[in-house]
Image (cartoon, grey):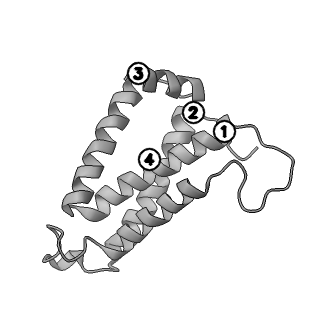
Amino acid sequence: MGGFKNSLSDVGYQHADILAYVSTGGELVAGVLLVLGLFTPVAAAGALAFLINGMLATITVRPHPHTFTYFLPDGHEYQITLIVLAVAVILCGPGRYGLDARRGWAHRPFIGSFVALLVGIAAGIAVWVLLNGVNPIA
């Protein structure tokens, strides 16, 4: 936990000591819920928020080269793939063997899926803006 707290503070997060415990617990809970297929849109939205926030952190930490690259600079393809997969889980639902599979609201796409998608994106960006405040694009 100490190393994670130090890496969060190195990136520029305020309150890194509290954020380390909250993010570790949130990632663990989201992962367990996704594996079980329980509260799938909420868990996937939480995972999406963590993934967006992590990508913003890696974009900010690495210097932007002014050379031509074929796809994305600094190898963000894996992070973008994980973000796309989290969006797919939000929109597709828990699957046949998930604990939410037989519930009526779990059939996708449902209006709650789109709300969960927007909440996940907003949460990832809001945590970045409120606790870091660095513009990753500039």
Q: Is 67 rendered above or below residue 112?
A: above
Q: Could you tell me residue 9's position as x and y percent?
A: 53, 23
Give whichever of discs 1 and 4 has the lower sequence position: 4
Give the residue drawn at x 29%, y 73%: 93
Give whichever of discs 4 and 2 has the lower sequence position: 4
Give whichever of discs 3 and 4 has the lower sequence position: 3
> Looking at numbered disc 2 in the image, what kind of residue is underneath it?
Asn
Near-viewer residue (120 or 48): 48
> Looking at numbered disc 4 in the image, what kind of residue is underneath it?
Phe
**Relative to residue 13, is residue 116 drawn left or right?**
left
Q: Is residue 46 visible?
A: yes
Dividing the picture into quadrants, the one containing residue 17 is: top left
* For the residues bearing labels 3 and 4, Cβ distance under 8 angstroms: no
Question: Mark 1 sits on what residue?
Answer: 60
Near-viewer residue (65 or 111): 65
* For the residues bearing labels 1 and 3, Cβ distance under 8 angstroms: no
Question: Mark 2 sits on what residue?
Answer: 132
Give the residue drawn at x 52%, y 26%: 7
The disc placed on residue 72 is: none
State the SS at label 1: helix
